[in-house]
Image: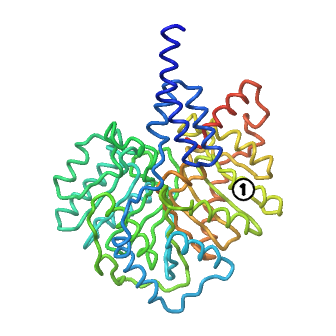
């Protein structure tokens, strides 16, 4: 045996075989386990590095102790219990109760919603409300860029801190990895409290590269909240299309709770008290029921995915979805096929071109599979569509940070708001129909006309990596 052969044998014995045993002992879904084993076997060295950084399982790690969680939840429980004449829609009661049981996601009535489909609308509204803040500004984002918009928001937060306002910012360490430290230091020096989510210090904690905080939530004075798909970056005002919401009303309490739980995790500071759950200055009175649902890799169940499955299989007339990345789990694909077999009008909108080429290649086979299952797929051509919405039967809709892919359902910390309200659902439906004007159907797409053998082989190989993307 040559020296190279001996080195390769030692590499396999010391690194690859123990890693394969670790994958098997984790009892992962077969598709994910097979994907990692293939990566480890067929990509020497690179495969092990990928597993080292992205494949180790920390799902069972306890991120917050129960006593602290009880204290952080107490105020939202009080606000929920004191709601008078809370009438949950009978049609969606099983889904609402499912979220309550699996996620402690409490439904709140009396909510007002404003929908933003352009970054310029969202950022103007955000800057205005930051300027009007009287007590606190809480921001949690996957990315905050060191660009024109990022610095504009940073300036507004620094101004708030100078006025004595409590300002807290959580950003994802990996999502904002390339942002220079001076950008955050400028804010901390001015009194803004800034924390990264799961910082990665090599070689310590490297497995946490795989578990990222993808949430985009903002709470101002406990009265006004934002949630959706937009990060803080200039590109959302130029060549990216996305959907973001401004919310006022009871559900702001749930969004505040979600932020404070994450704040406790990153800072170990427990923040409670009535001033973070104030009586709103402007009362909202309606029966718009809203539920904030969070998903994370430490939850015993993939809560948001389970909710999507129930919504899809219980739809009766139509399902309209927008997602920038379509790498669905087998469960989601089966649910979509079940819906189309039942005669439901299922429409899926994806970007014509993705911002990630590997994801685009991997998603093509899933798009073809969805078309074969009866889903009507449309490609948005105007710009990159990063919107994540779902609307069903004029009675239910959701918007948030969750993509229809393995990573959002299983690995990321995500947040979506669900509305059980006809008016809100119809407005979200109109967003989809307006976007449809800038789409072409998949029958016109080049890659849906059966590609060459080499192209199909390449896309099928990349598809094997979809649980890891």
Residue 437, percent from left and from top: 67, 52
User: Dot 1: few (<14), some (14–19), or many (≥20) neighbours within 10 Å?
Assistant: many
Instruction: Report whether residue 114 is seen.
Output: yes
Which residue occupies 39% across, 55% down?
141
| Nearer to us in this view, 139 or 383 | 139
| Nearer to us in this view, 330 or 31 | 31
Which residue occupies 55% across, 84% down?
287
Q: Quadrant of the C terminus?
A: top right
Residue 389, percent from left and from top: 59, 59
Q: Quadrant of residue 1?
A: top right
Q: Is residue 130 left or right of residue 339?
A: left
Q: Is residue 199 above or below residue 446?
A: below
Residue 252, percent from left and from top: 42, 74
> Given the current orientation, which residue lies at the most extreme bottom position?
85
Residue 184, percent from left and from top: 25, 48
| Nearer to us in this view, 2 or 41 | 2
Instruction: Report whether residue 127 is seen.
Output: no
Q: Is residue 9 left or right of residue 71?
A: right
Q: Is residue 206 left or right of residue 340?
A: left
Residue that mark 1 sits on: 347
Q: How is the image coloured?
A: rainbow
Count all numbered tags in the image, as a single digit: 1
> Given the current orientation, which residue lies at the most extreme top position?
2
Instruction: Find numbered disc 1 in the image and state the secondary structure of the residue it sits on.
Output: strand
Q: Quadrant of residue 455?
A: top right
Which residue occupies 61% across, 38% down?
35
Which residue occupies 28% across, 78% down?
273
Q: Is residue 338 left or right of residue 275?
A: right
């Amino acid at each position: 045996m040559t020296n190279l052969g001996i080195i390769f044998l030692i590499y396999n014995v010391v690194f690859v075989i123990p890693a394969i045993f670790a994958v098997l002992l984790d009892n992962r879904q077969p598709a994910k386990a097979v994907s990692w084993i293939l990566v480890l076997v067929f990509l020497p060295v690179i495969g092990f590095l990928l597993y080292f950084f992205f494949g180790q399982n920390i799902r069972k790690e306890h991120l917050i102790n129960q006593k602290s969680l009880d204290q952080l939840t107490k105020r939202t429980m009080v606000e929920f219990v004191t709601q008078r004449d809370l009438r949950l829609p009978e049609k969606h009661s099983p889904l609402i109760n499912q979220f309550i049981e699996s996620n402690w996601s409490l439904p709140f009535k009396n909510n007002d919603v404003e929908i933003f489909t352009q970054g310029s609308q969202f950022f103007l509204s955000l800057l205005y409300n930051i300027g009007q803040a009287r007590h606190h500004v809480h921001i949690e984002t996957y990315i905050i860029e060191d660009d024109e918009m990022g610095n504009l928001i940073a300036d507004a937060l620094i101004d708030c801190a100078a006025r004595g306002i409590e300002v807290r910012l959580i950003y994802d360490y990996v999502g904002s990895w390339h942002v220079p430290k001076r950008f955050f230091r400028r804010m901390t020096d001015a009194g803004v409290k800034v924390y990264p989510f799961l910082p990665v210090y090599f070689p310590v904690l490297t497995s946490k590269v795989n578990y990222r905080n993808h949430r985009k939530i903002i709470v101002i004075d406990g009265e006004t909240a934002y949630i959706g798909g937009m990060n803080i970056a200039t590109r959302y005002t130029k060549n990216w299309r996305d959907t973001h919401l401004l919310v006022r009303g009871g559900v702001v309490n749930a969004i505040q709770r979600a932020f404070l739980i994450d704040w406790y995790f990153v800072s170990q500071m427990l923040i409670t008290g009535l001033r973070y759950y104030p009586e709103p200055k402007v009362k909202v009175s309606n029966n718009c029921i809203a539920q904030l649902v969070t998903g994370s890799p430490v939850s015993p169940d993939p809560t948001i995915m389970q909710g999507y499955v129930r919504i899809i299989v219980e739809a009766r007339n139509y399902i309209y979805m927008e997602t920038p990345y379509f790498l669905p789990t087998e469960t989601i694909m089966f649910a979509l096929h079940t819906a189309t077999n039942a005669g439901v009008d299922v429409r899926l909108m994806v970007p014509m071109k993705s911002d990630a080429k590997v994801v685009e290649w991997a998603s093509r086979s899933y798009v073809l599979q969805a078309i074969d299952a009866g889903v009507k797929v449309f490609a948005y051509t105007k710009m990159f569509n990063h919107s994540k919405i779902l609307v069903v039967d004029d009675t239910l809709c959701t918007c948030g940070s969750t993509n229809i892919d393995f990573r959002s359902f299983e690995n990321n910390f995500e947040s979506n708001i669900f509305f059980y309200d006809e008016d809100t659902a119809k407005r979200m439906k109109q967003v989809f129909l307006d976007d449809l004007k800038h789409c072409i159907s998949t029958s016109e797409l080049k890659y849906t006309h059966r590609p060459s053998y080499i192209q199909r082989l390449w896309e099928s190989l990349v598809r094997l990596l979809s649980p890891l993307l």
